[in-house]
Image (cartoon, rainbow, N blue to C red):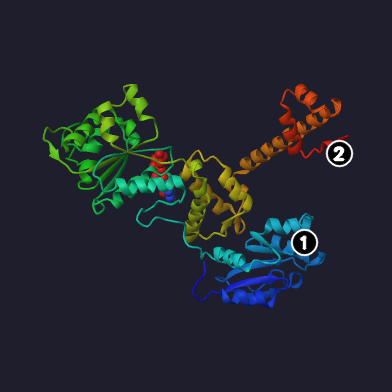
Amino acid sequence: MTSDTSIRCVVWFGQPTSAERAQLAQAGWHTRVADAGTQGSGVGIRRGDMVVAMADLRSAGNDALLEMARLMAEQPRLPWLALLSADTAVQTPDVERVLRASIDFFTAPIDMQRLIETLATLAGDTPPPVAYTDVPGITGASPAMMAVVAALRKYAPVDLPVLITGETGTGKEVAARALHKLSPRRDHPFAAINCGALPANLVQSELFGHERGSFTGANARRIGHFEAAAGGTVFLDEVGDLPPDAQISLLRLLQEGTLERVGSTQSIKLDVRVLAATHVDLEKAVAQGRFREDLYYRLNVLRLRMPALRERAEDVLQLAQLFLDAFRKQHDCHARTFSALARKALIDFSWPGNVRELLNRVQRAAVVAEGAQISVADLDLQEVVNLRQAHSSLGLTRTSAERDAVVACLRETRFNISECARRLKVSRVTIYRLCKKHQLVLEDMH
Ligand SMILES: Nc1ncnc2c1ncn2[C@@H]1O[C@H](COP(=O)(O)OP(=O)(O)OP(=O)(O)O)[C@@H](O)[C@H]1O
């Protein structure tokens, strides 16, 4: 974190041009030129300063390059950026090492605007991810999330039950809280109850309360969660787990707006809005007789489906950065961003545990990451990368086998396209298409 007195400094290993220095100064960055060979770790970093290191390879000779790679290995906590000339040989091992250790790289002519934007991101200046100010807790700008936000705005002021569906960790409770906060009930209580976690013999008393002496251990009158939330909203998570007697009581509350405490026959009038969530197929539970059909219709007046994270890949990076930034505010952690490979893995992963899993993985990665960027290994997503590589090498194998088969058949048929098509059991047009795809020029092959 930077403080008011901290400075923003680019420690430049190499030679910045005066125009580059001037533009950085204008953006609030002080440039300190350092010599990789002599300065090593003594770059004069003050605690609290925001420092970014620049590995300028544009005119670096072999020795400077080696020094730079060594320095980067020694200073993994510094965020490094690399500058390349148009003819830097990027495939050489030393340049590769530098690029791997860099958060980003820029090729001459340097796009100073992008460079300054990157510095601002590293300093934490980027505007927070799109968080809908009037829809608290909801982040994401994907079309699927926009649809959710539109539904939340529409449903919030209507005093009817909402059935929220979606896989585990998709944000059903977040959506329920948003509905409450956007509704006229916002100044009254919000109670979230996981029906699956209530002890079976106490569900009725937990939800609707009990009178003194109504069962063994009921030493005093107790009001239940519904009464405690009077005037507000009750969110019933895993509503499909409610036992039959609690289903009847809930139906009565929804139909007549009344409840009875366990051990009492007195009806109590109550004003609460009920939101319910399920990650199981409630229709199936109705068909199997495990859930009352009349209650299902009462709860399912308005329906909201929370999309799985894999359906909104656009949101993954935004959420990941949001979770990392939030973690950094609370903990001393070096990680500021994600490596390019880690970003790709985050997008490619299927996220069976949805947003909750993303949050957990990012927090764990932030703890274990050694440097400024979170790697694939920190996220424990190495398998995703391996799978992608396996797919791409399978693709390459298929492509080269296809090319070989076409070339062999063309040779055998003495470049008779009709005969080749007949033997490969494809049309003549397909043979021409395959020749084009594999860049086979028929005249060259004779
Ligand atoms: N759109 C979002 N923006 C920011 N954080 C989110 C979002 N959606 C979910 N989260 C976070 O993900 C975690 C899981 O969300 P939540 O508990 O609402 O999921 P759920 O669908 O109710 O899960 P379950 O079915 O397991 O009860 C929470 O920490 C929540 O804050």
Instruction: Give x and y (percent) for residue 290.
Output: 32, 24
Q: Secondary structure at mark 2?
A: helix
Q: CA distance from mark 1 to mark 2?
A: 35 Å
Residue type at numbered disc 1: Thr
The part of the image, by quadrant, that contains residue 169 is top left
| Residue 62 pos. (x, y %) | 82, 64
Mark 2 beta carbon near ligand 1 (under 8 Å): no
Q: In this picture, is 241 found above or below 107? A: above
Residue name at image x 23 percent, y 34 percent: 250
Q: Which mark is residue 444?
A: 2
Classify 60 as above or below 289: below
**For numbered disc 1, what is the local secondary structure?**
loop
| Nearer-the-camera pick, 264 or 386 | 386
Specify the quarter for ligand 1.
Answer: top left
Amino acid tagged 2: Asp
- Which residue in the structure is indicated by mark 1? 88
Q: Residues within 10 Å of mark 2 (few under 14, many from 20)?
A: few
Identify the residue at horizontal 41%, vertical 38% (top origin). Answer: 166
Q: Earlier in the sequence, mark 1 or mark 2?
A: 1
Q: Kindly give the residue lying farthest to the right in the view shown.
A: 446
Query: What crowding class fits label 1: few (fewer than 14 Cα within 10 Å), some (14-19), or many (20 or more)?
Result: some
Q: Nearer the viewer, residue 36 or 46?
A: 36
- The part of the image, by quadrant, that contains residue 384 is top right
